Amino acid sequence: VDPQKPMLRWVQDRIDAMGATEAALRLLSNHNKMVQLSAVALLASLLQGTNRRVQRTIRSYTIKHKNGVLFKVMSEAVDTALEGLKEHRRYLKLASRSDTKGTVRSGFSTRTDGEELGKALGFGKSSMIMLTLRLIQLMCKGQYTSLQNMMLEQNRTGNSFNVVQRLVDLFEALQPLISLSLAHDNGDIALLAIQLLDTLKELLMGPNEKNQRYVLGTSFLAVCNRFFSSTCFVSLPDDAPKLKGTDMTSNDMRCFLKCALIDACHAMLEGSASKESRFLAKVLDNFETRNLYAQVLEAGQVLGLVSLSVDAVSADTQVQDGDGTWRSARGALTQPLLKRVGSAQAYSGRPDGSGRDSGKGTARSGKEGPGTVAANKRMRQQATRLKLSKGYEKTVENSMFGLYFLMKTLVEYDHDSGLSQRMEELATLHNDLVSFLERHCSTVEISHTKSESGKRLVEVVHFRISDDVRKLTLGKGFRKVAENAMFDVPRDNPQEKAKAFIRRLHQIRRLIQHLLFIGGHPASRFLIRNKAWLDQAPLVLAALITLGLLLFYGVPIDPNTNDILADGIYHQPISTVRTPPAGYSQGRYPYPELTSDPDGIGEGYGSILRASDLALKYRMSLRSRWESKAEWELFPAGKYLLWFMGLLHLLLAFTNAVITMVEQLPLKIQNVLEAHMVLPDGTPSATVLATGITGAAYLKNPPSIPTMPTIQWAPSLFLDLLKVCRTGIYHGLLVSVSLLGLISSPLFFVFLTLDFLRTRGGRLVMQAVLHGAPNLVRSFVLGVIVLVCFGFYSYAYFSQTVNISQELCHSPFQCVAKHLLDSMTGDLTTVLGDDFGNFGYPSMVVWKDSWNSWRSFFLFCSIVFWVFLLQGIIQGQIIDAFAEKRNHDFYLKEDLEKKCFVSSIDRFVFNSYPGEWEKRRGGKYAWNYLLFFTQLAYQDEEEYNGLENMVSQSFGEGGINFLPIEQLAVRQRGDMAAEGKDMLQELLERMDGMSNHLEKLDGLSARMTQFESQLFSVQQATSTMLSAMFGRPGDTDQNRRGSVSSEVDSPRLASQSFASMPVSQTDWAAASRRVLQLQDPALSATVEPECL
C-alpha cells in the first residue's frame, strides 16, 4: 500500500467534512470564468486517488439541488471548446498555407481577455476544458455507477444535460485536427484528445451497459476507425524538434494517442460475455479490419519484428500533403522505405530481414552487434526515420498488444470472417510477430455476476506477460517450487480446493515480486534461473568426494614393493582364541628380513596389516588429514583433486546460503513481521474514513492522522522468526562442515551426503516418516516398555547365565540398556544366552525341569512379542506411510490428467470443444492465473477496469467468487447461442401467430369497409327519401336534394322534419316505394309493403 495514499485520503476527507466540496459546487454558478476554473480545480484535487466520500458528496449535492449547475458548467466548457476548435482549425490552415511550423497558438490564446483567461479558454493543461475532462474522469473513477449514469441524464434535476454526447461530439471535432496540430509541432490538441479518451473510458468501465449502448449508437466508433486509418508514424529527421511544452516528438505523442484510443475501445467491449451478439457485431461493423491489421504491422516494424517488404507495408498508407492534410496512397511510402532499409536487410539473420531465424549466437544475447534483433530494429528505424524518443518502445509494445487483444476479442463474433482472415494472414505472413505476441500474452476466464439478471457469466480476459516475469516462470527451479505449492491442495471439494489454491497463489506471487526486485542485476538473474542445479551440485560433489575417499584414501602401501600391501587381500592374524575362517589364514610375508621383527610381526601378512592400520594410527591425531602422506600414498594427486572438489563444494554451499539469505529468508521474515503488525491506537480504519459524517460532528471528533502499522513484540514473534530461519541455519551448518572438511579432514564431506534429505527422494522419505510419525511413536513407546520389562526380568532370571558366565552386564541399568540396544538389532542372544548354550535347550520333561521350561517360555514370549509383532507392526506402518504418500502423489497427478484444475470440469466434457483441453492438461491453466495476478500487482489500482477491480478486491480478501468453478467460456457461448436460437424460434412462432391475427384483421377491415359503403348507401337513400317525403311541387330533384341536405345538415331543421313525418304504415310504405323508385324502379315493384 502506498504510504502517501492514506494521508492524502485523510486530508481530503477532512477538507470535505469542512464543506469545501459543496462550496466549490456552489461557486460553479458564479459567472466569473476564473472562479469556475478554480472551483473545478479544487474538486479535481479533492477527488484525486478515487475518494469515494467526495464522490458521494457530489452526488448528494446534485440530487438535492436540482439546478444542474455542475453539468451545465461541463456542457458549457465542451461547447466553448467546440467553438474554439473552429478558430484553431483556421489557424492551422493559415499556418499550413504560410508553411510556418511551430508558430501556431492554441485556440483562444490570441484573445485580449487577459493572459490567465486566455490560458483558461485554450487547450493547455490548465485550460477549462482540460480540467473539466479531468473532473469528469475523477468523478467516475472506481466505476462509480451513480455519477456515470448522471453524465448521460440527470433524472432528478430540473435541466438535463447529455454530457456523454457532448464528449463524443468533441472527439469527432478533435480527430481531423490531431495530425494537423502534430505536423506543426503543437501537442495541445493531442493531449486534449488523450484526456478526452481517458474520460470516456471511465464513463464506460464497470461495465456501464447504459453508457455503452448509448455510445454505440453515436459516431464514436466510426471516429475511432477514422483515427486508425489516418494516424501512423511519420518520417522525422534526426534533429526533429520536440512538441511545445513536452519532451516528446510527434511520433511519441502518436504512441500515447493510440494507447488511449485502444483503452477506450476495450472499455466499450468490457463485459462482452453478458452482451448480445448483435451488440458486438455492431461494434465490429464500425471497424475496418485492414486498419487494425495495418496498425499492428506498423508497430511490429518499429520494434523490428516485421520486415519492410512490399507485402508487409500496409496497402493503404497515409501520406501528408503540403497543406498538412492526410490522404491515402497505395504503396506511396513503400519504395522509398525499401530503398533506405537496404542496409538493414543486409544485416538481417533471415532473407526477409526479420533477424529472428534461429535465435542463436548474438541474436539471443543482449549485444548490439550485427544480426541481433536490437541492431535490426535500430537500423530499420534509422532507415525509415520513424524516430522515437528513448524509452517509448514500451508504449509501442502496449499499443501493439492492445490492438492484438482487440482483434482476438472481436474475432469471436466475426460472422463474415473478414477479421478471421486477417488473423490467419497475420499468422502466415508474419510468423515472427505472432510468435512474439503469443509468447508474451495469455488468457484467463473470470466468473462474475450480471447485475441485471444475477446470472453467473464467464468473461475471457486477455493480458500481457512482461518479459521478466516470463523468463522467471520458465526457470525449472522456480516452476518446480511453484507447482509443488499450487497443486498440493485437497481435490475432493472444488470449493476447498479453490480456497487453498488462492492462498498458494498469494505466496507464489509475493515470491515472484521479491525475485523480480532482487533480480535486477544480471548475476542475480543467473543465480535465480540456475538455482535448481546449484542446489544439487554440493550433494553431487560430496558424493564424488566420498567415492574418491573409498577408492584411494587410507590404502596401506608396502614400502618394499611400493604396491598395495598383500595385493589388497585381507589376512586374518594368528589368534589363540579361535582359528581364522577359511580363506583368511595368516599368509607368509615374502620380506620378513626387511622388517624390524622378522620372527614376530614380519612373519605374516596378518600381523603386518595390523601393525600398518592407518585408521588406528591417525584416529586420535589432531593434525589435518590432508597433511598425512601415508594415507594419500596410493594416489598423491587425488589429494589435490579432492581438495579442489572440496573448495568447489565450499563455494557452492556458500552461494546457496547467500541465495537462501537473499531470496527466501527476507520474504519469510517479512511475512512473520506483517503477521505481528498492529495499527496504533487512534489510527482510522477504512470504515471510519468511509463514513459520511461532516461538519461540526466530524471536526469535534476527527480521526487521528494515519500512521503505518507497527510490530508488536512478543515471545511468539521470536519463535516464529526462529522457525522461518531454520533453512538459513541449515545452510550455515553446511558451510561450516564444508569448511571443516577443507581445512581439517575430507571425512567431513561424507557427512554432507546427508543433504540428500533435501532432494525430492529424501523429502519423500521424510514426509512418509512424518506422516506416519504418530502411529510409529505409539508403537515404539509400547516396544520400549516391553523391552524394559523383559530387560529387568532377564537381569533377575539369567544372572548366572548372562551376568556371571558371559560377563555382559553387571548392574540393572547396564543390563536393561544393553537389552534395549541389542533388541534394536534383533539379536537377543547376548543378553538371554549364548549361541546354543545353556539357555538354548528347553527341558526334557516339563514337570521335571520347570526352571528351564519357564526360561524357554520367557524367551519365546520375548522373541514373539518383539521380533514377530512389534517390529513387524513398525515396519508395516512405515510401508503404509510410504504407500499412502505414493498414492496421494499419484492421485494428484491423475487428477491433473482427468480434470481441469481451475474449473474442476471432467476431461470428457472438453471433447466437444477442440483445443480447450490442451490448454488445461496437467494444470497448465493454473499458471495463467498466477501470471494474471502478478500482472495486476504491477498495475496501478486506479487503472483497473470493473472486472479487474472486482477480481483484485476478492483476491486480496481470499475470495473465490471470480474463479469459473464448473463453468467454461466456450460452453457458455454455445449455450447462449442455443438460447438465442430458441428465442429466435419462439419469436418466429409469435410472428406466425401475429400474421394469422393480421389476416383476421384484414378480413375484418374488409368487412368494415363493406359496412361503411352500405351505411353510406343507406345515408344517401335516407336523404333521398326525406326529399321525396317533404319535397314541394315543381321542385327538381337537384333542388329537392339540396333542400333536404340543408335541412338534414341543420339539427334543428332535421328534428322539425322528422317531427312532421307520417306515422302510418301506409305513409311509410309509400315513401319507401318512392325512394326505391328513385334508386332502382325495377326493384321497387317486387318489394312487398311489409318488407318495407
Image: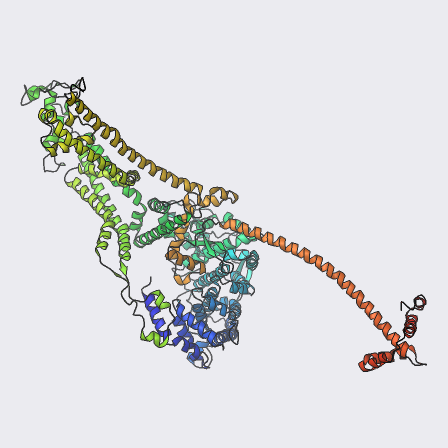
Q: Is residue 326 visible?
A: no
**How is the rendered protein coloured?**
rainbow
Residue 1014 location (% of width, % of height): 83, 67
Residue 986 occupies quadrant: bottom right
Q: Is residue 861 above or below residue 5?
A: above
Residue 809 seen: yes
Q: In this view of the protein, which residue sits in the foreground, 327 or 34?
A: 34
Query: Which one is in front, 1007 or 71?
Result: 1007
Judge from the rendering whether residue 588 lies leftward or rightward of residue 163; answer left or right.
left
Task: Give the image location of residue 57, x and y in percent.
Answer: 42, 72
Q: Quadrant of the N terminus?
A: bottom left
Task: Work out whether 84 lies above or below 752.
Answer: below
Is residue 382 or residue 808 the one in the foreground? 808
Return the x and y of residue 372 as percentages of the image width and height: 39, 49
Residue at 29% from the left image edge and 54% from the top image edge: 671
Please tell me in which quadrant of the rendered image residue 756 appears. Answer: top left
Nearer to us in this view, 123 or 886? 886
Whether residue 833 is situated above or below residue 782 in the rendered picture: above
* Coordinates of residue 1044 in the picture (x, y in percent): 86, 79
Instruction: Identify the image quadrant of the C terminus.
Output: bottom right
Say left or right for 606 vs 689: left
The tally of labels here is 0
